[in-house]
Amino acid sequence: MKKIMKCAISMLTMLAIMVTCCSCGKDEAKKTGNKKVTVTLWTSVGSDAAPVEKERHDLQMKRVREKFPQYEIKEVLMQTGTDYRQMYDKNLMAGLAPTLFTEFSYTDIPTRIKNGTIADMTEFVNEWQYKKDGKVITQFDEAISKDGKWYAIPRDAYVQATLCNKKLVAAGGGNPDSFPTTWAEFAEEGQKITDFSVPRIGYALLGQDWCAWPFTGWVWSAGGEMVRKNADGKYKLSFTEAPAVDAAIFMNEMIWKYKMTQKNVLQAFSDTSADIVGGRAAYSWASIADFKESDLQNYGLSYKDFGMMTMPVKDASIKSPALSGGEVCTFNPKSTKEELKAAWEIANFMYYDDEELQAQWDFMNEKGIFDVKIPARSDLLEKKLTSLKNIPESISRDVLKLSETAIAEPFCPNWSDVKTALVIPLQKIFLTENISRAEAEKLLNECAATLYSQYPDSFSEK
């Protein structure tokens, strides 16, 4: 009898343990199932940011969190002082990269597709209603997709060509209401305006380490291309062709023949920008979007004193271009499908939602923020420009005109390496008085040969 009782007690004890374990398992599963999906963003604003920028950011993130209470949104301050590409790659390898990243230029994406450092988002893009409705800007499409697959979506865009200080043009005897349209007209006006004793210069030429950026616009204005896609998918480096050589020579002539540029053409970009807002340069490769009203007021200027013009062209047969660039949203290839879905929804809200965009514009109006960036929503540029009351009508017209003729900056794999490689040969061309066409062409050909050798998977002469 004792043995029977002992067995019964043991069986009841084991049953109780099993029930308890099953109950604990269910509770744990329930607890795990309710755990919020975490989305990490590198959008946090540093302590040195202007108060209005911090307020702008905090209000937007408040709206984001209110919109998505089901997600854990973790913000990290992006480190400064290092190249954002290298920083992203190091964090990706360490498992610390953001779920949603919004800093890559669309020109970075072909390389990113190639090295697998961004997620394939085709499943989301194929079901994307904004895309189906034709409400997404398309100038980046070829760069952010490959073989029918999609790896990024636009965040916003900009247009850039030539910024004009109208007051300075008038002071130099030019016509601020009629921009020069050809190289000959531009050189003639630049010479007329330039007076180093004032000092006043016709064109602030950007010759420092970013010089391949404006050079691209000048090559287009000569009817040429920086790169051309081959039948095999690789790219021919066409900055060695006649139009590109024409552009390089014209830039050299602006310095030495027409003497219409600043004397130190290798000065920092900030100095070049300061020349045009400070009343020392009439024209420059710049954008009014780079300046605050307070920057202009220091020199007795306002936004109305500036104009944004397309590139002057070699001859009237060439359509006057502007350059379009911009950033995209990319997603972490190591994220789970649930994390990608959450990040996708957040990106759509921040950069595409009508009400959210209007809330951003309302804040800009309240604080007097000037912003002429092109929204990722293709149907909202005019609405944005008319919504922002501190954008002069003339600037709005200029932005719309530039956006109509803008060409997307080249986006082949290793494009950043092309721009870096071109710095030294371009600077040699700029700094060499009386350089011959043959000498300039030789420098560009040598640069191309080096790139063909270094990046055979991206570039081919055939």
Image (spheres, rainbow, N blue to C red):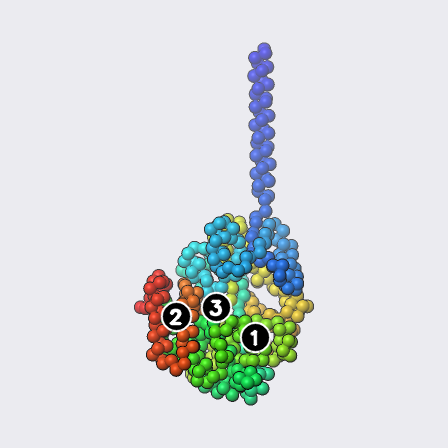
Q: Nearer the viewer, mark 1 or mark 2?
A: 1
**Mark 2 packing: few (<14 Cα in 10 Å), some, or many (20+)?**
many
Specify the amino acid type for callout 3: Gln
Specify the amino acid type for callout 2: Val
Counting residues from the start of the chain, the first of labels 3 and 2 encountered is 3
**Mark 1 packing: few (<14 Cα in 10 Å), some, or many (20+)?**
some
Most extreme residue toward the left is 462
Secondary-structure class at tag 2? strand
Q: CA distance from mark 1 to mark 3?
A: 31 Å
- The residue to which callout 3 is attached is 139
**In contact (CB < 8 Å): disc 3 and disc 2:** no
**Mark 3 packing: few (<14 Cα in 10 Å), some, or many (20+)?**
some
Counting residues from the start of the chain, the first of labels 1 and 2 encountered is 2
**In contact (CB < 8 Å): disc 1 and disc 2:** no
Q: CA distance from mark 3 to mark 2?
A: 17 Å
Q: Is residue 111 visible?
A: yes
Number of marks in the rendered image: 3
- The residue to which callout 2 is attached is 227
Q: Residue at x 60, y 40 (%)?
A: 31
Q: Does 200 sit above or below residue 135?
A: below
Q: Where residue 355 sits in the image (x, y, percent)?
A: 63, 63
Secondary-structure class at tag 3? loop
Give 346 or 206, whichever is nearer the viewer.
206
Give 443 or 111, whichever is nearer the viewer.
443
Left or right, residue 300 beside residue 187 = right
Q: Residue at x 55, y 88 (%)?
A: 173
- The residue to which callout 1 is attached is 274
Q: Where residue 452 sits in the image (x, y, percent)?
A: 34, 66
